[in-house]
Image (cartoon, rainbow, N blue to C red):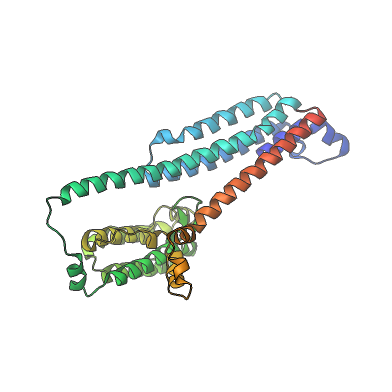
Amino acid sequence: MAYDTQYAMADREDDLKIGVKSTAILFGRYDVIMSRCYNTLCFAYHGRGHLALLCTDKLRPDASIGLALVAMMFAKQNSACATRNARACFQAFLANIWVGVTSLLSLQSLVYGRLLMDNFKKLSKSKAKKSSDANAPVIDYQAKLAEHGLTREQVIATERKLAKFANTMDSLVRVPFTKQGMGADAALSTIPLAGDLAGLALTSYAFVLGRQLGVPAHKMTPAVRLALIDMVVGIVPGIGTLLDIFIRPSRKTLGIVHEHLHDEYGITETMHMDRPFLHQSLEDKQRSRFGAFWHNPIIAWLYLHIPDLLGLIVVVVGWGLWAVISWLVSLFGKVTGFG
């Protein structure tokens, strides 16, 4: 709406002649104020995304330098439109592509910055573990599994079941390229009290699966506490549903369980957690008559990363369409004398 108003401000005189009811004509002398309000709302939306990633992924604040650049661009556009000069308003409208690209790159830097930090931490932990393991006694993971009446395959299958449940409850619809999202728990929280109680009851299934894998009750306490907080906060209309993006007891349970399995049973694989549905599907395909084909490492990797590849294609195609549309708008501006 901000850029639609800015474009309409550039065409105000022509629109008045031909009778077009644009937003600039609708807002009248409040057109500049309304354009600034829409820019502010847009900036608040971008800021919310950055804040969510910073809070949940604990990234460094300077990773949001792109957000500051977006704020500067909005300020420049607001200043240009304040004069109501047709050329200045049209130039402010054309600048929308730079706001979009800057915001996109900034969000991508946050996400991939987090991935780099995670990989660096894993590498550091791995090196520290290797140095400590040199003098540590050898742990018989098979004996520990047998002690609980489990096999490695059963543990991975049960953890995958827990990951499916956690995804359904807390991150069924994800923010692209992140692990943040909303699921059935957020949907249930829209139903006052009854929905929150139902969400708590369903979340208890994650605790049951954790106990089946031998996780001690005291280790599950943080997840249980988070589930109770989620129920209490969820009673607040609107705000409770929004906070469900960040309060995710089922995902918390999954993290606790995986840490326990890593320490107690030596389970280091994570793909069955990150892509549980695809992992199950791939496993089924590997047991089929074409199993040799699906056991190929490259084919298996491509299959498990289908969501990432599709997301990349969407981003590339979207950027291409945006560039073409921007070029056409620029060409139109030059032809009509506004460029």
Q: Is residue 245 left or right of residue 102?
A: left
Q: Quadrant of the N terminus?
A: top right
Identify which residue is drawn at 59% across, 50% down: 314
Q: Is residue 52 left or right of residue 89?
A: left
- Residue 334: % across, % down: 78, 29
Does residue 176 sit above or below 78 in this rendering? below
Identify which residue is drawn at 44% across, 69% down: 292
Identify which residue is drawn at 51% across, 51% down: 176
Q: Is residue 252 left or right of residue 284?
A: left
Which of 242 and 138 lies nearest the eye of the viewer? 138
Total marks drawn? 0
- Residue 332: % across, % down: 78, 34
Identify which residue is drawn at 70% across, 23% down: 83
Which of 139 and 106 lies nearest the eye of the viewer? 139
- Residue 199: % across, % down: 41, 66
Which of 225 and 307 lies nearest the eye of the viewer? 307
- Res 86 visible: yes
Extreme-front residue of the structure: 292
Examine the image and state in which quarter residue 262 appears.
bottom left
- Residue 48: % across, % down: 49, 43
- Res 40 visible: no
Which of 267 and 72 lies nearest the eye of the viewer? 267
